[in-house]
Image: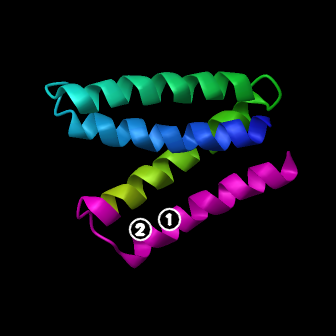
Amino acid sequence: MSWVVLVISGVLETVWAAALSASKGFSRLNPSLLFLVALALSMGGLAFAMRSIPIGTAYVVWVGIGAVGAAVYGMAALGDPVTAARITCLVLIVAGVVGLKVIS
């Protein structure tokens, strides 16, 4: 159960990062509210997962999912450049996250 919560929390990290960008410095209400809700749920889920998953593993998995999600969102929705080097680096992050799950 902790791993499921951790993965969902990582996805919510992507949501709050995208909402933070869309809030334009907290000048737009709806993205700002989405940021706050997603942030609280993401942090709460991370805290829950850390009850049974070591802090180093939990934090790296959470950040990795959020970072990859934010990068993919940027490329898919915001026109960030899609390059072979960028994709390779994202694949390496995913491999590291999967590796931590396997050895935990």
- The residue where tag 1 is placed is 89
Q: Dominant secondary structure of the magenta stretch?
A: helix
Q: Amino acid at mark 1?
A: Cys
In the drawing, what numbered circle is on residue 86?
2
Tell me residue 21's x, y (percent). Answer: 25, 39
Tell me residue 95's x, y (percent). Answer: 66, 62
Q: Amino acid at mark 2?
A: Arg
Tell me if residue 82 is in the magenta stretch: yes
Rendered-image quadrant of the C terminus: top right
Assign a secondary structure to mark 1: helix
Disc 2 and disc 1: Cα gap in Å?
Answer: 5 Å
Residue furthest to the front:
30
| Range drawn in magenta | 76-104
Q: Are marks 2 and 1 in contact (CB under 8 Å)?
A: yes
Q: Residue at x 32, y 64 (%)?
A: 75
- How would you rate the neighbour count of disc 1 (Cα within 10 Å): few for under 14, some for 14-19, many for 20 or more? few
Position of residue 23 relative to residue 103, above or below, is: above
Residue 72 falls in which quadrant of the image? bottom left
The front one of 47 and 64 is: 47
- Is residue 57 shown left or right of residue 104? left
